Image (spheres, rainbow, N blue to C red):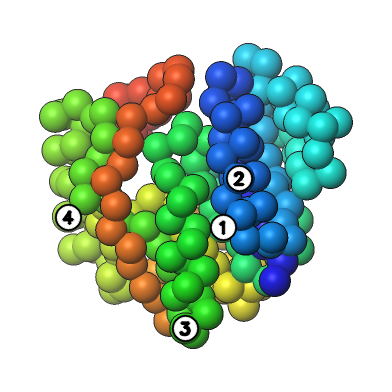
């Protein structure tokens, strides 16, 4: 089995070495063939230099550098375009998504599920206001949409290659990736988990960016 791990990131220099070490431990424990694709979404810190260092230390690392900050959805799509694995795992770079869940995701994939997503029981270090706004957003979106948009679900998931190939064919310019994951269908399975706090740094999503 070949596994591609796609990590979009913006200003995560402090988390990247530990994140790769976590992924490496999980993959080596099962002797998986894998690649880790870091998509640097126009970071202004030393994230790209860290990625280059990781590439010199491991042939499992592939780095993609955006010239400016395009956003998380374009970064994910770029990773999908480059991924070679039988399955693709997407996760954030801040270590709030535990790589240990990959074991369970792969078990469900072997049972025939195509899209195994992690659903948060709690949302980690979020303020009360941000949590309320997020829930309000999903409530409004559910009322407007003809498909079921999953609340409290981020981008931490495992996708069968069939899902990835379908996503590649979608040519939206303004991509709402969480909605597209729901829209494409396929057999889905959720895994509930408690989201941790960030290992380092701060979220680049300001109040006004989230509101927008």
Return the residue nearer the eye: 88 or 59. 59
Q: Is residue 175 left or right of residue 192?
A: right
Look at mark 4 in the image and give the residue it sits on. 139
Circle nearer the N terminus (2, 3): 2
Circle nearer the N terminus (2, 1): 2
Secondary structure under badge 2?
helix
- Report how far apart the C-alphas of labels 3 and 1 lie in the structure: 17 Å
- Which mark identifies residue 25? 2
Considering every residue shown, the one lying at the far front of the view is: 29
Secondary structure under badge 3?
loop
Circle nearer the N terminus (3, 1): 1
- Report how far apart the C-alphas of labels 2 and 3 lie in the structure: 24 Å
Q: Is residue 174 left or right of residue 51?
A: left
Secondary structure under badge 4?
helix
Tell me the quadrant of the picture where the N terminus can be found.
bottom right
Residue 95, relative to residue 183: is it above or below?
A: above
Circle nearer the N terminus (4, 1): 1
- Report how far apart the C-alphas of labels 4 and 3 lie in the structure: 32 Å
Residue in the picture at 71% in, 23% down: 50
Return the residue nearer the eye: 146 or 122. 122
Give the x, y percent position of residue 166.
61, 74
Give the x, y percent position of residue 31.
69, 60
Callout 3 touching callout 1 (CB < 8 Å): no
- Mark nearer the viewer, 3 or 1: 3
Circle nearer the N terminus (2, 4): 2
- Mark nearer the viewer, 2 or 3: 2
- Which mark identifies residue 89? 1
The image quarter in which residue 190 lies: bottom left
- Which mark identifies residue 111? 3
């Amino acid at each position: 089995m070949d596994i591609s791990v796609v990590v979009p990131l913006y200003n995560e220099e402090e988390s990247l070495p530990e994140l790769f070490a976590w992924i490496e431990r999980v993959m080596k424990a099962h002797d998986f063939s894998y690649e880790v694709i870091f998509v640097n979404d126009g970071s202004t810190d030393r994230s790209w230099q860290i990625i280059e260092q990781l590439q010199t230390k491991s042939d499992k690392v592939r780095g993609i550098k955006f010239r400016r900050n395009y956003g998380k959805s374009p970064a994910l799509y770029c990773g999908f375009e480059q991924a070679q694995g039988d399955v693709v795992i997407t996760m954030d770079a801040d270590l709030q998504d535990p790589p240990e869940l990959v074991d369970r995701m792969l078990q469900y994939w072997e049972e025939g599920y195509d899209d195994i997503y992690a659903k948060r029981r709690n949302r980690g270090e979020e303020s009360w206001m941000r949590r309320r706004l997020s829930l309000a957003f999903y409530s409004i979106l559910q009322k407007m949409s003809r498909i079921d948009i999953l609340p409290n679900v981020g981008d931490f998931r495992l996708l069968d290659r069939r899902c990835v190939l379908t996503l590649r064919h979608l040519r939206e310019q303004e991509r709402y990736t969480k909605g597209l994951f729901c829209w494409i269908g396929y057999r889905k399975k959720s895994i509930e988990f408690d989201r941790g706090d960030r290992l380092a740094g701060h979220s680049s999503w300001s109040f006004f960016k989230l509101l927008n």
